[in-house]
Amino acid sequence: MGNEKVKCLIIGSGPAGYTAAIYAGRANISPVLYEGIQPGGQLTTTTDIENFPGYPSGTSGTMMMEDFREQAERFGADIRFGIATATDLSAPPYKITIDGEKTIEAESVIIATGAAAKYLGLPDEDTYAGMGVSACATCDGFFYRKKVVAVVGGGDTACEEAIYLAGLASKVYLIVRKPYLRASKIMQARVHHHENIEILFEHNAIGLFGEHGVEGVHLVKRAGEPDEEKYDLAIDGFFLAIGHKPNSDIFKPYLDTDEVGYIITEPGTPCTKVPGVFAAGDVADSNYRQAITAAASGCMAAIEAERYLSECEYRLKSK
Ligand code: NDP
């Protein structure tokens, strides 16, 4: 049996992937979308989305992604479960391996694989994986009702996770390495005013301890300073919210990426250096990383894919 041939392959299913599928479906380029490890993407692990236009009372990330998916299907997108595990973008048709088995030959490819949560890199994060260490408060917060937890990070994600956990846990420590929060002013205010949340500025987590799961964290305050202080804090859960790593590894042999791994596109467009291969959403955006900007870039990628395919067809006909 030969490889399956498709006109437009979309890899990833966050706001960028689904929006690309809506536009590509409406443009009649028969998009096939593989949802990846986390159908719906990162938004399915956030709490309320309050800043996406069109939802005046807010909505949940999961519901919003279900709406996006339904809309994409309405316009004929073929949405499938599967993970892109390898690529060959050396020449068209581009070859994408799904789940290490099946190969798709795609005339155009839209990469919308997003980004994944970063960990500190402490060996204890592996030791206690699933035993008190998590990078998703909405997934795992339920297990920490009336318990004590720590969240690492000082950005919007960390504040959001801390606020969510404060509604369940008896106490939330926010471990922030700098003397200030990086989060937006509104999130900072919410964290500061929450009586269950205590911010530990200028602190770093350097290890975890516990017999059968996390029972505490080893902390260092003002590391490297003359008044450096090391101490242990009893906690039941340890949540990471220190940013994300773009899911671009399988594309790196063919596309340019920055030092973190974000795919580099032509400024203001989703075009990569490979004709017919486009990157949209967080995998190519180190700056804004919002659902609305991801959706917009998914739209742009689908428009570019349609233009590219039309040009290819025209060239073929005029030969
Ligand atoms: P950010 O990159 O904004 O913040 C990461 C935080 O983690 C920073 O405080 C950073 O510290 C800290 N950090 C990074 N590495 C380490 C480390 N090794 N040890 C300790 N601390 C570390 O990521 P976010 O995920 O918070 O946000 C990403 C984007 O998504 C932002 O643009 C944000 O505005 C947006 N967002 C918006 C939301 C909303 O509007 N509702 C919700 C969530 C995110 P330092 O400051 O020292 O670098």
Image (cartoon, rainbow, N blue to C red):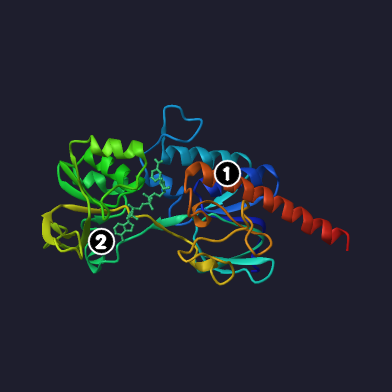
Is the CB of mark 2 within 8 Å of ligand 1? no
Under circle 2, the secondary element is loop
Under circle 1, the secondary element is helix
Q: 10 Å neighbourhood of mark 2: few (<14), some, or many (≥20)? A: some
Residue ID at (24%, 44%)? 142
Depth order, front residue of 99/262: 262
Mark nearest the camera among 1 and 2 is 1
Spot the residue most to the top. Answer: 56
Q: Amino acid at mark 2?
A: Ala
Relative image position of residue 58 (x, y in whole percent):
42, 31
Q: Are marks 1 and 2 in contact (CB under 8 Å)?
A: no
Would residue 92 appear left or right of 171 to someone viewing this image?
Answer: right
- Which quadrant would residue 299 be assigned to in this image? top right
Tell me how many marks there are.
2
Write down the residue under mark 1: 296
Spot the residue most to the front. Answer: 226
Distance between the Cα atoms at labels 1 and 2? 35 Å
Q: Is residue 72 above or below residue 282?
A: above
Residue ID at (25%, 58%)? 130
Relative image position of residue 319 (x, y in whole percent):
88, 63
Write down the residue under mark 2: 129
Depth order, front residue of 33/227: 227
Q: Amino acid at mark 1?
A: Ala
Relative image position of residue 133 (x, y in whole percent):
24, 57
Relative image position of residue 167 (x, y in whole percent):
23, 37
Depth order, front residue of 142/226: 226
Q: Is residue 241 above or below residue 47?
A: below
